[in-house]
Amino acid sequence: MNPKLRHVLSARDFTREFIEGIIASAAVMEKALVEKTVLPNHAGRVISTFFFERSTRTRISFEDAAHLLGAQVIPCENAKESSSVGKGESYEDTFRVLGGYPLDAIICRSDKSNLGELARFSQVPIISAGDGGGEHPTQALLDLYTIWKEIGRLDELCVLLHGDLQSRPVRSLAIALSSFERNMSIFVGPEKLQLEKETMEFFFLSRRMEVRTPFVPPVLDLRLKLWEEVDVVYLTRFQDERKVISPEEYAVARRDFFFSPDKLGKMQKHARVLHPLPKRDDEVDPALTPEFDHRIAWFRQAHNGVPVRMALLHWVFTGEFYNPPLW
Ligand code: NCD
């Protein structure tokens, strides 16, 4: 990571120390929010949220986080239409302009998996809020914070990643998990939606995480006691807007990888089910709510987005983790 211009573009840049620093800061931020005590004051700082794709959680939690820290926010929602990109301006020129304004960060969701490239034109830190079919690094941070809070550790975990394995939250979470020790990631999804070879090679080279793939439903259900063994199940929405497979194949995938109460029933008491949301009723049984079973953690997970993004913004602004003396 560039120590001066703190772009946040890929979970590949996260070290264990960085993730632990953000998690510790987020825990302090969350405590201060709950107890309504003092938060770091970033009055005078200005960020812009520039979103080329739809968003509920990522955009609102980033904007809430910035406001809670006293920073001002300039939002640009639906940027494909509402910014000059809609008039034909290139993404590159847009970033040359935005990246030259006196902003403290640009939070951008791109539809083109090009944020790494665009960040080169910016003198302002770029934080990825989801990069097309690529990565979603801040989602990985809040996912890890959730696992740490709910299960108590980030090493020696067995994590089953389920559904659309090419979705950006899966990619970033799996990469971030490989910064820890003795984790196992099990990828369960359609053959045509497995993680690409390049990311698999990254895991192989990092040598810290054991990887198992692929599994298909009959094997999964009949021969392997998978649900019984896992600490975390990470469900995903099939991101059909990426058009990786045909609409018919997406429909089959939704049916084959439907998450139902019987699967949850097999899981251990301490295990948790996460989902970056939004979820669809034809992918996850609508009966599965936190009231139905406490192991359903996805709304708590979404709410963790605020303290985690506060911790991240504080780090981007100052280069430091938020760790005030306790008195
Ligand atoms: C995800 C995304 O946008 O990639 N949502 C999120 O940011 N929490 C997941 C999705 O849209 O499927």
Image (spheres, rainbow, N blue to C red):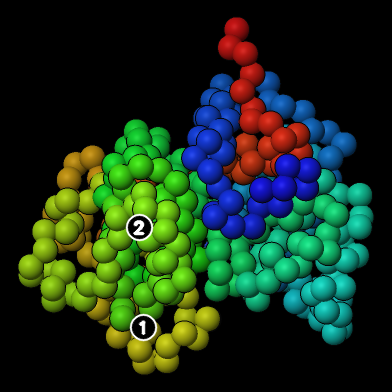
The amino acid beneath tag 1 is Lys
- Residue lying at 75% horizontally and 34% vertically, measured from the top left: 318
Closer to the N terminus: mark 1 or mark 2?
1
CA distance separating discs 1 and 2? 19 Å
Front residue of this view, candidates 108 and 315: 315
The amino acid beneath tag 2 is Tyr
Residue 282 pos. (x, y %): 33, 75
Question: Which element carries disc 2, helix, strand or loop?
Answer: strand
Q: Residue furthest left?
A: 223
- Residue lying at 50% horizontally and 66% vertically, measured from the top left: 168
Asked if ligand 1 lies within 8 A of label 1, the reply is no
Q: Quadrant of the C terminus?
A: top right
Can you tell which of label 1 and label 2 is closer to the viewer? Answer: 1
> Alpha-carbon neighbours of circle 1 within 10 Å: few (<14), some, or many (≥20)?
some
- Residue lying at 46% horizontally and 56% vertically, measured from the top left: 175
Question: Which element carries disc 1, helix, strand or loop?
Answer: helix
Say whether residue 303 is visible.
no
Front residue of this view, candidates 294 and 39: 39
Q: Are marks 1 and 2 in contact (CB under 8 Å)?
A: no
Q: In the figure, is residue 166 to the left or right of 96? A: left
Residue 215 pos. (x, y %): 22, 72
- Residue, disc 2: 234
Say whether residue 211 is visible.
yes
Which label belongs to residue 192? 1
Residue 20 pos. (x, y %): 50, 35
Rendered view: 303 above or below 28? below
Residue 105 pos. (x, y %): 78, 50
> Alpha-carbon neighbours of circle 2 within 10 Å: few (<14), some, or many (≥20)?
many
Find residue 132 and report its image quarter: bottom right
